[in-house]
Amino acid sequence: METQTWHNWAHCAGASPRRFATPKSVAEVSAEVARAASEGLHVKCIGAGHSFTSVAVTDGVMISLDNLRGITSAVPVSPSGALVTVLAGTRLYELNPALWDLGLAMVNLGDIDAQSIAGAISTGTHGTGARFGGLANQIRSLQLVLADGTVADCSAEENPELFHASRLGLGAVGIIVSLTLHCAPAYMLRAVEAPARLGETLANLDEHVGSVDHFEFYWFPHTDRILTKHNTRLPGDTPPDPVPALRAYIDDELLSNTVFEGVNRIATRFPAAIPQINKLTARVLGARTYTDRSYRVFASPRRVRFREMEYAVPAEALADTLREIDRWITDSDFTVAFPVEVRFAAADDIWLSTANGRETAYIAVHQYHRRDHREYFDAVETIARAVDGRPHWGKLHSRTAEDLRPTYRHFDEFRSARDKYDPGQVFDNDYLRRVLG
């Protein structure tokens, strides 16, 4: 374990730390941090490695929280749900069914469930729904190991500065070892998925976003075709009507993963064929309606390896931003095989949240891992920056502290808290120096 090399899921960030630690308790995490600080080594914590950036990379001590998993308590706060305390290394795919067994569910979720809960909230995982915030909005209190190895508890009432900085803290303030979430009563989702036209959907966007609890769509570049997803929350005792097993296998595993991997391999060799491939792909994905447990509807398997960049733009700027991206793709002759994912979120007050202070639309662009993403991502980033877009902290971007500071009204407060709780920059790395200064 002393010389183990780590890399993230996308294989676009890696590290060979001086030491790799797998503590089995909060006390052991504390001891590892204190030891590293005494040796003058940097410390970074890893979860499932699903960030595309180098946010977790270190040349010092890398700490995995894989041994800190599970729910430790659940306190009902009827009728609004319960306060659930979870160990930081718990994977979302473990947490969701465990919550369901308690009659509970996450208020909102992203579209994959492989991450650890602490990693997901620390980098700003958000899900979709114009009335709902990201995962960090569900946090009510945190326990952290600070840079000197001490353990601190924080909430809006106790150590509020530490709480506001660390509930979306990029791992810069301390290592989250447990967190208390406000979870909703278990609920079902009725999912209506259907093909549509981009132009028509953008013309009636407010109706789509406001008519259901969770709306998103996937646009196939080089076409005007999209796949829409309208998800409506239903009581937890609603009878399930899931996608039949064969249809689920064909749609979610065979087409969306196995065939899509093959399509991208072909597209890598023959990029000129991508526009026709996209037109065919958009036609293959048909309409379907089903009802299932919320977490089963939110998340879907992603086995095709890719690179991703995602920008949060003001909701009112979405339509124009997508049109500019479409115009760039057309004018540049660059070919894009992956759909562009569009989601929505309510404004919040979290210091480093990409939805801080404004209703937000998210535009996520992807590139197959065997193709160069840089020209495409650079172009989309330029377009998004023109409308004060904010990059997802865990996905690829080229922003720096100098140009991020003006778009976050609490940026200096966050940096002040970081310097207060980690004056020796124990939790620092190249990525944090770039985005925080």
Image (spheres, helix red, strand yellow):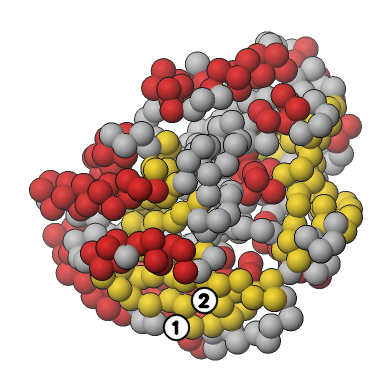
For disc 1, the marked residue is 288
Q: Quadrant of residue 40?
A: top right
Q: Report the residue at 24% width, 60% height from top.
A: 221
Is 371 left or right of 129, judged from the image as shown? left
User: Looking at the picture, does residue 304 appear above or below residue 285?
Assistant: above
Q: Quadrant of the N terminus?
A: top right
> In this view of the protein, which residue sits in the foreground, 411 or 423?
411
For disc 2, the marked residue is 191
Is 332 left or right of 389, judged from the image as shown? left
Residue 365 visible within the image: yes
* Secondary element at image label 1: strand
Q: Report the residue at 23% width, 75% height from top.
A: 280
- Do the residues under discs 1 and 2 have CB atoms within 8 angstroms? yes
Label 2 crowding class (10 Å Cα cut-off): few <14, some 14-19, many 20+? Answer: many
Label 1 crowding class (10 Å Cα cut-off): few <14, some 14-19, many 20+? Answer: few
Q: Which label's residue is closer to the chain start, 1 or 2?
A: 2
Kindly identify which numbered label has been placed on residue 154: none
Residue 308 visible within the image: no
User: Looking at the picture, does residue 49 appear above or below residue 28?
Assistant: below
User: Looking at the picture, does residue 172 appear above or below residue 52?
Assistant: above
* Secondary element at image label 2: strand
Residue 124 position in % (x across, y down): 56, 42
Amino acid type shown at disc 2: Ala
